[in-house]
């Protein structure tokens, strides 16, 4: 319960900044996903 109280104090005294911009991490992940889906799947034979 002490962790909840500590987080509550930090949030209460903090400043929240909302940024309306594209995330470079999301953009990078989307590009990686598109690249892996466009490449043919390698068959794994045992």
Image (cartoon, grey):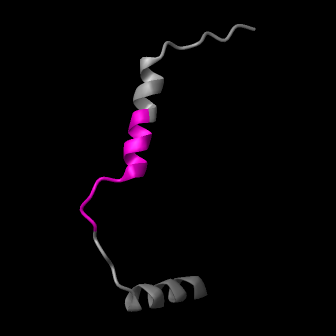
Q: Which contiguous range is marked in magenta? A: 19-31
User: What residue is rendered at 37% in x and 44% in y?
Assistant: 27
Which residue in the rendered view is the most extreme toward the right? 46
- Residue 15 coordinates in the image, percent (x, y): 35, 84
Residue 11 lies, in percent from the top left, at 41, 84
Of 7 and 30, the residue lying toward us: 30
- In the image, residue 44 above or below residue 17: above
Residue pictured at 28% horizontal, 66% vertical:
19
Residue drawn where x is 46% and y is 87% of the image:
10
Percent coordinates x, y for residue 23 in the rendering: 35, 53
Quadrant of image for the N terminus: bottom right
Q: Most extreme residue toward the left, as rendered? A: 20
Q: Is residue 22 left or right of residue 31?
A: left
Residue 35 is inside the magenta segment: no
| Relative image position of residue 25 (x, y in whole percent) | 43, 50
- Name above or below for residue 32 compared with residue 23: above
Which quadrant holds residue 34? top left
> Is residue 17 visible in this depiction of the protein?
yes
In the image, residue 30 lies in the stretch drawn in magenta: yes
Camera-nearest residue between 8 and 35? 35
Compared with 4, 40 (above or below) is: above
């Amino acid at each position: 319960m002490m962790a909840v109280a500590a987080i509550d104090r930090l949030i209460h005294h903090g400043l929240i900044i909302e940024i309306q911009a594209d995330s470079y991490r999301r953009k990078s992940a989307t590009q990686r996903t598109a690249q892996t889906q466009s490449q043919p799947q390698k068959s794994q034979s045992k």
